[in-house]
Image (cartoon, coloured by chain):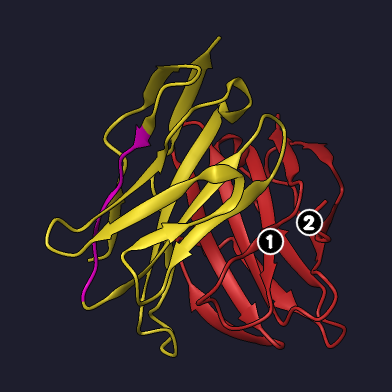
Amino acid sequence: AQSVAQPEDQVNVAEGNPLTVKCTYSVSGNPYLFWYVQYPNRGLQFLLKYITGDNLVKGSYGFEAEFNKSQTSFHLKKPSALVSDSALYFCAVRDRGGYSSASKIIFGSGTRLSIRP
Amino acid sequence: DSGVTQTPKHLITATGQRVTLRCSPRSGDLSVYWYQQSLDQGLQFLIQYYNGEERAKGNILERFSAQQFPDLHSELNLSSLELGDSALYFCASSPGQGMGEQFFGPGTRLTVL
């Protein structure tokens, strides 16, 4: 069965330090992987995606993520955190059976990122 | 602003009632998705429509139904409401069938009393 795990409910980082938000997945075959961010009282905003190709994906606001097939991980990273990065981050996976009625998108439980000044 | 609109923003109703949530996708997007976000269940995918037809189904209860109309707007109908249905309901849209990014609306907050 398809699943996504975000093992940390909360990540706390000092401004200017690098940050990592972890995501591991389980899906049959090769997945489509996504990261979204949610600010308070707002809908989710797309950050980046992995479809195929280079394992290092660059996205919005200086974020990047590395697809690691052997570890079935897709961790979100940023070299230097900003206070404005404080938000709720979701990892999502969709299998490549995209043309069958069984294909669906699974979101992780979310990780709250808190950047202290 | 994602370009996806949802109405109403807030909805307060009683148990046993029926409500309809409405979503207008971004101009040109053919797919519409519905999600439920609650504190205990997290973000749950409910259903996807593509160009008027059901494309993928998630954890949608039998009491809930959705449709996408010829003008591509979508409605989510929730009936026989229970206290546990209180949640934030998001609509999202995408140009294709779901392999790319989705654009989320601001959500409808449903409170069942």
Residue A9 image position (x, y, % from top left): 36, 27
Residue A43 image position (x, y, % from top left): 69, 45
Q: Amino acid at mark 2?
A: Ser
**Outermost residue toward the left in this view:** A70
| Left or right relative to A80: residue B108 | right
Look at mark 2 in the image and give the residue it sits on: B2
B68 and B19: which is toward the camera: B68
Chain B palette colour: red
**B53 relative to B15, above or below:** below
**B9 relative to A49, above or below:** above
Q: Quadrant of residue B84?
A: top right
**A6 relative to A60, above or below:** above
Q: Amino acid at mark 1?
A: Phe
**Gap between marks 1 and 2 measured at Cα:** 6 Å
Residue A75 image position (x, y, % from top left): 32, 46
Q: Is residue A87 shown to the viewer in this render?
A: yes
Question: Which region of the structure is painted magenta?
Answer: A20-28
Same chain for the residues at labels 1 and 2, yes or no? Answer: yes
* Tag 1 secondary structure: strand
Residue B103 is marked as 1
Which chain is drawn using yellow?
A: A
Magenta region includes residue A26: yes
Q: Are marks 1 and 2 in contact (CB under 8 Å)?
A: yes
- Chain letter for mark 1: B
| Left or right relative to A73: residue B77 | right
**B48 relative to B76, above or below:** below
Magenta region includes residue B91: no
| Left or right relative to B65: residue B19 | right
A13 and A38: which is toward the camera: A13
Quadrant that contains the C terminus of chain A: top right
Q: Is residue B79 shown to the viewer in this render?
A: no
Residue at 66% x, 41% y is: B88
